[in-house]
Amino acid sequence: MADRKPRYKTYDSPAGGWGAAAATAKVLLEQSVVTKGSRALLSMNQPGGFKCPSCAFPDASCTKKLEFCENGAKALAHEATKFRVTREFFAQHSVTDLMAQSDYWLEMQGRLTEPMRYDAATDHYVPVSWDDAFALIGRHLRALESPHQAEFYTSGRTANETAFLYSIFVREFGTNNFPDCSNMCHEPTSRGLPHSIGVGKGTVILDDFEQAQAIFLIGHNAGTNAPRMMTPLVEARKRGVPIVAVNPMPERALVRFTEPQDIVQMATFGSTEISSEFVHIRIGGDLALLKGMMKVMFEREAAGESVLDHDFIAAHTSGFAALKADVEAQEWPALVAAAGIDEAQIRRCAEIYIRSNATLICYGMGITQHQRGSELVQQIANLLLLKGNYGKPGAGISPIRGHSNVQGDRTVGIDEKPTQAYLDRVRDVFGFEPPREDGHHTVESVEAMLAGTAKVFIGLGGNFIRAVPDTDRSYDAMRKLDLTVGIATKLNRGHLVHGKDALILPVVARSERIETVKGEQFVTIEDSMSNVTASRGVLEPASEHLLPETEIVCRMAMATLPDSKTGWASYIDDYSLIRDKIAAVYPALYEGFSERLKAPMGFHLDIPPRRRVWATPNGKANFLVLPGLAVNAPVDDPDILRLATVRSHDQFNTTIYSYNDRYRGVYNDRMILFMNADDIAARGLEAGAKVALETIGVDGIARRVEGLTILDYPMSRGSVAGYYPELNPLLPLGHYDKTSGCPAAKSIPVRVVAA
């Protein structure tokens, strides 16, 4: 596919529909799992089955309806693939040779089959026994001068049981260094929202979509990143619910969508118009839109109307006067200029919000990945507080998280800034004194590698090195390490950019059965709406040499902590014992964990704002002020554009399924720069021209990516977009939200330079 000629063709059909059905069939055929994969899909997201390894959107109520989407089918097909990466494969390919291959090529080689160790003398990975692999990890960790010289990464695919034990192992070892995939996406939710409403999660459950009177979708592309979300959106539009989509790029699924499971629509080639209002915002203009909507509300109040929920504000909130003063001080010309849309549209959005008595606001990384992303999340919370849109059906705030258990990992202890109360509970339950100081988030972990103070990196899933910013510097940082460990199902770039010693440890996948001496085991997953469900694999493991992630964590702990009194060996065999410990550490959330799991659809964790209870220091929901209209540091150069890195439709995080992005009309190419026609003309360029992008960070280092093709695309003026992770080299390590540590990947200041 990589050697086929690139082509670009506008996609005018609805998203979903027969295109999604065809793509699902194609990927099953490509991976040679038509029969096997089709059977497994019937068990995905069903009671008694396994949870999709892709997005974190919740399942519908207990039903026989199919609960998978095109991208879930791709994830499963690539997990269930017949292709294998064996010891013979590694004997044929040196690491240097593999580094020359694309991410797509690496993905297509198939499943890892046995543990491998890097041999520097030959530049090849060679087989290693599991016992020797764990012994090597133990030796390196015990030899460190300080536990803080190790970094322990976690991917969102990690189940609750594994993540919990990982957090206990690492804290018993002596550090809180937990760089995590959430650091790179919804960390502003985790760090920003608690100051507003007392919890770093959404307050919405799936049933709220059925009762909402208005839905706002800000900064995310549901049709690609959470396709199952399209079903409740389609149903809402059929009921006449207004849906406002806010994005610098018009996304096809939020324009028109055909529900693949709607027999009538499929038979008649029908579709549903999704957005009643598309807000073509400038990158970083969301703050101006939110303040503009609030300004309209305050204007209406000043004119004698009652549009705010005054009783709710008086009983449940603090800080209203300061917010009102800040918003009223904003001038309309400045609001319009910052938002990149006209005043009339801001007023239309405000009118939709005012008329609704139950509003949902869903947001994604278009909100969080800015230099003040945590504070921007708080402004969404402010808007909802003005009309009491918490603690009632059909209302609330909903971060749309991308990975299947990224929220659950945080709930059960993957947190570089743990609370003292949590650490006290760990001490009381496990009998050791955990470290009390904050650990490293993702950016800090790379900085520690660059400084030479980090010596060991263990990656529990994921593809850390391709996900992090500042690719070239991050590669240099990783290669300084004494040991890197990649725990994974598939070969990826993270196994090739490695330390002096390196291990690849292959694991049982989400869709595969886990059998121990105690019988079949299952794990649990928390979706983005705080529902916890069981996940039971149905397929045979890809190799007899794979181990479950939970066993790998336990055996790393046993090799590293020979005097530990924690029952690591028992947890390998019986996952219910792990759940008992989770319940002991988190009694308010997980009391009766095993019993509650017997419900077919699991159970919801308690989210206090749903009860209008606020776990903040003052016991109130807080209006918080973000002065001005900027969510990123200003740039003086008038030629600078703001770059947002985005995923293609044939991609999940760093996993590339193909070189196509059909909804954006791109085929056989990923080196693309989506650009507004006026911005192209203003620079004397033409669509189809080859260009480079440059950016300079706060560190003064020049960064450049060559070989991008300009695509005339309806971007907002001053905004450009290109694919992640190819454009990660342009994102300086220091360009991040200081509250949360989240890289500002949706607003990178860049200059377009002719090739």
Image (spheres, rainbow, N blue to C red):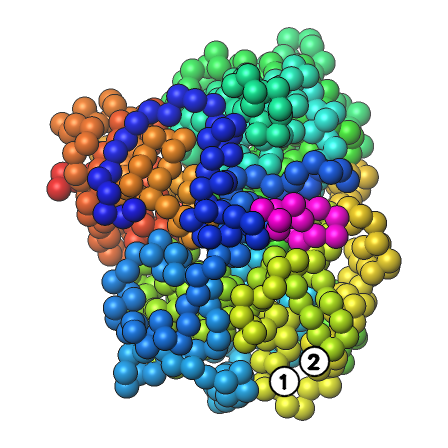
Amino acid under label 2?
Trp
Q: Quadrant of the C terminus?
A: top left
User: Which residue is disc 2 drawn over?
Assistant: 568
Q: Quadrant of residue 309?
A: top right
Q: Position of residue 449 (x, y in %)?
A: 39, 71
Viewer-proximal residue, 730 or 6? 6
**Residue at 52% from the left image edge and 57% from the top image edge:** 79
Label 2 crowd bin: few (<14), some (14–19), many (20+), radius 10 Å: many
| 42 relative to 692 in the view: left or right | right
| 607 relative to 68 in the view: left or right | right
Q: How many marks?
A: 2
- In the image, is residue 42 part of the stretch drawn in magenta? yes
| 366 relative to 725 in the view: left or right | right
The answer to whether the residue labelled 1 contacts the one labelled 2, judged by CB atoms less than 8 Å apart, is yes
Q: Position of residue 256 (x, y in %)?
A: 50, 21
Viewer-proximal residue, 406 or 506? 506
Determine whether the residue tagged by mark 1 lies in a helix, strand or loop: helix
The vertical placement of 574 against 384, above or below, is below
Amino acid under label 1?
Met
The vertical placement of 333 against 180, above or below, is above
Residue 465 appears in view: no
Magenta-colored span: 38-51
| 565 relative to 752 in the view: left or right | right
Viewer-proximal residue, 218 or 602? 602
As drawn, the label of residue 617 is none
**Residue at 22% from the left image edge and 50% from the top image edge:** 704
> Dominant secondary structure of the magenta stretch?
loop
Closer to the chain start, of discs 1 and 2, is 1
- In the image, is residue 28 part of the stretch drawn in magenta? no
**Residue at 78% from the left image edge and 62% from the top image edge:** 586
As drawn, the label of residue 558 is 1
Label 1 crowd bin: few (<14), some (14–19), many (20+), radius 10 Å: many
